[in-house]
């Protein structure tokens, strides 16, 4: 009897996927098992700066000293998480992606001291989500490195790999009975390259660019891979979850049809994604990247490449460390080669410049808006990384903040049309879409100006009132009906 049932189930599964692949694959609606989500990150929404025993992280330190705004209160989710869960329930998402604040759980970053209040906060949040019928997708690290690590070289220190694995181990132990989808680390390129590059320009002129980015990336990859293996061997069977790393890619389009611009676009993809994706999928840095950096380093009088090497064992550990490919995607770059300068930096190794494209609209913080870029990035991932299952973990639009936000609805519709084209016409295996973000929040160096939220937050009122925007109602109807052009009301 059980056997017959299993066979019937299999037939249904095969039919189902055949239906998706055939000409009946609908471009205007999503299958019932496709997952819709929305997201946040700890530093951007929690606030509760040093409440109940939380330790400081790098952003707490940096924003309070160097920026004109900070996440000390942010969207106050540490105190208002039940309002967040109510909003999520109203919208009816399948998943809520949020991140753990490392120092809320481990105030000094190390496992010897655990902050029970922090553990309780995440237990409460996870339990409230599950009660509301929403699955948690937990990012273990979204850029808020414990401040204590700054004294020991943070992501440039190989020991951070162990500290991260210790933290992740604790997270699985504490929350893994209820969390079935884990992302180890969010967008390493951004915090290993973009942030250091930006702060070097303004504040820390002596930070050794061209060295730091690669050390940071190397340790991120090892931290991720060792965490993946730990989960696989110690928890996965029992907890039955999946795990991956979140990588980001915007489309890189040659500015003209010259060979130089073509090569610039390829180089951009190599540095933007290949650098980090290749080791996770195939076990090592791409050969082109290794060659390029070996040659440059030799010409610059380094005795070895600035790109660190993986040992044979590390390559084995790294290869295939993803159950799903988590992708963040926002925009498009029209690229041409940058003039070479002798300054050391990842940016200069990449040697690509972004050209203005006056034909395309931009968001209020200058993200170029071009929905087909999403399809092209999805196709690139399918073709380059062995047709993985892809969960889009971020895609979003920032505005000045109106509750009536047709522009955001349009953005989501345009993006989802591209997702369907990608699934139906290109056969890309996309299983989920996450709109970034649930709430208006602290948008890093754009402070509170960039409002990405489906839900408006009143930062001027003492209770940080949440109000659903029109886009939240649209997203709700979309999730219910599965129709891209669902109504708003
Ligand atoms: C980050 C988010 C950020 C978003 C919009 C992504 O790179 O993961 O934290 O808010 O982009 O800028």
Image (tube, rainbow, N blue to C red):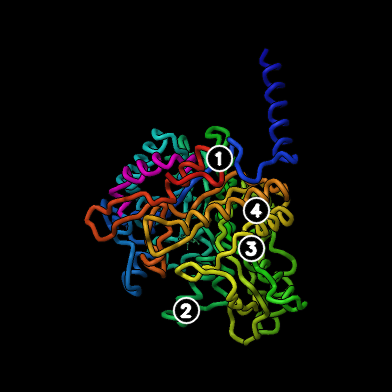
* Dominant secondary structure (helix, strand or loop) of the stretch shown in magenta: helix
Tag 3 residue: 273
Q: Secondary structure at mark 2?
A: helix
Residue depicted at x 64% and y 73%: 334
Quadrant (top left/top right/bottom left/bottom right) for the N terminus: top right
Q: Mark 2 highlights which residue?
A: 200
Mark 3 residue crowding within 10 angstroms, few (<14) / some (14–19) / many (20+): some
Task: Classify mark 3: helix, strand or loop.
Answer: helix
**Label 3–label 1 contact, CB within 8 A:** no
Which residue matches tag 1?
482
Distance between the alpha carbons at the discs numbered 2 and 3: 23 Å
- Is tag 3's residue or tag 1's residue first in the polypeptide sequence? 3
Residue at the (72%, 31%) spot, across then down: 14
Position of the C terminus by quadrant? top left
Q: Is the residue indicated by label 3 positioned so its CB lies within 8 Å of ligand 1? A: no
Q: CA distance from mark 3 to mark 1?
A: 31 Å
User: Would you say residue 58 is visible in this rendering?
Assistant: no
Circle nearer the viewer, 4 or 1: 1
Q: Counting residues from the N terminus, which is met first, the one under dot 2 or under dot 1?
A: 2
Is residue 283 shown left or right of residue 64?
right
Q: Determine whether the residue tagged by mark 4 lies in a helix, strand or loop.
A: helix
Earlier along the polypeptide chain: callout 2 or callout 3?
2
Disc 1, SS:
loop
Report which residue position mark 4 lands on: 318
Q: The magenta stretch spans which residues?
A: 76-95
């Amino acid at each position: 009897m059980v056997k017959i049932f299993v066979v019937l189930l299999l037939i249904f599964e095969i039919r189902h996927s055949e239906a998706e692949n055939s000409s009946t694959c609908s471009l205007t609606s999503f299958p019932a098992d496709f997952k819709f989500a929305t997201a946040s990150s700890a530093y951007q929404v929690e606030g509760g700066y040093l409440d109940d025993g939380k330790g400081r992280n790098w952003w707490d330190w940096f924003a309070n000293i160097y920026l004109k705004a900070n996440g000390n209160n942010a969207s106050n989710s540490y105190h208002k998480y039940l309002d967040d869960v109510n909003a999520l329930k109203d919208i009816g998402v399948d998943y809520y992606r949020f991140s753990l604040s490392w120092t809320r759980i481990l105030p000094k970053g190390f496992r010897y001291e655990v902050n029970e209040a922090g553990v309780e906060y995440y237990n409460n949040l996870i339990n409230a989500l599950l009660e509301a019928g929403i699955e948690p997708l937990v990012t273990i690290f979204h850029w808020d490195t414990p401040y204590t690590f700054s004294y020991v070289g943070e992501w440039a220190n190989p020991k951070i790999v162990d500290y991260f694995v210790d933290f992740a181990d604790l997270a699985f132990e504490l929350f893994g009975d209820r969390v079935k989808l884990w992302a180890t680390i969010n967008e390493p390129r951004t915090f290993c390259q973009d942030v250091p590059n930006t702060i070097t320009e303004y504040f820390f002129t002596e930070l050794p660019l061209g060295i730091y980015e690669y050390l940071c990336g190397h340790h991120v990859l090892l931290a991720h891979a060792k965490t993946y293996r730990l989960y696989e061997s110690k928890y996965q069977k029992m907890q039955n979850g999946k795990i991956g790393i979140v990588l980001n890619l915007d489309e890189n389009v040659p500015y003209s049809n010259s060979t130089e611009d073509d090569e610039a676009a390829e180089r951009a993809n190599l540095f933007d994604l290949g650098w980090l994706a290749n080791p996770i999928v195939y076990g090592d840095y791409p050969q082109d990247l290794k060659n390029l950096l070996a040659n440059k380093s030799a010409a610059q009088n380094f005795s070895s490449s600035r790109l660190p090497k993986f040992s044979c064992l590390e390559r084995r550990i790294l290869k295939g460390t993803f159950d799903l490919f988590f992708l963040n995607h926002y925009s498009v770059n029209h690229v041409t080669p940058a003039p070479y300068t002798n300054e050391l930096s990842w940016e200069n190794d990449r040697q690509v410049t972004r050209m203005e494209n006056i034909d395309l609209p931009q968001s209020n913080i200058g993200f170029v808006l071009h929905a087909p870029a999403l399809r092209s990035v999805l196709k690139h991932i399918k073709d380059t990384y062995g047709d993985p299952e892809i969960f889009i973990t971020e895609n979003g639009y920032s505005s000045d903040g109106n509750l009536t936000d047709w522009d955001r609805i349009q953005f989501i519709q345009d993006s989802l049309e591209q997702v369907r084209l990608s699934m139906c016409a290109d056969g890309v295996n996309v299983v989920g879409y996450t709109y970034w973000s649930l709430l208006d929040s602290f948008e890093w160096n754009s402070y509170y100006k960039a409002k990405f939220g489906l839900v408006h937050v009143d930062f001027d009122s003492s209770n940080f009132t949440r109000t659903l925007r029109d886009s939240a109602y649209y997203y709700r109807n979309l999730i219910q009906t599965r129709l891209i052009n669902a109504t708003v009301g």
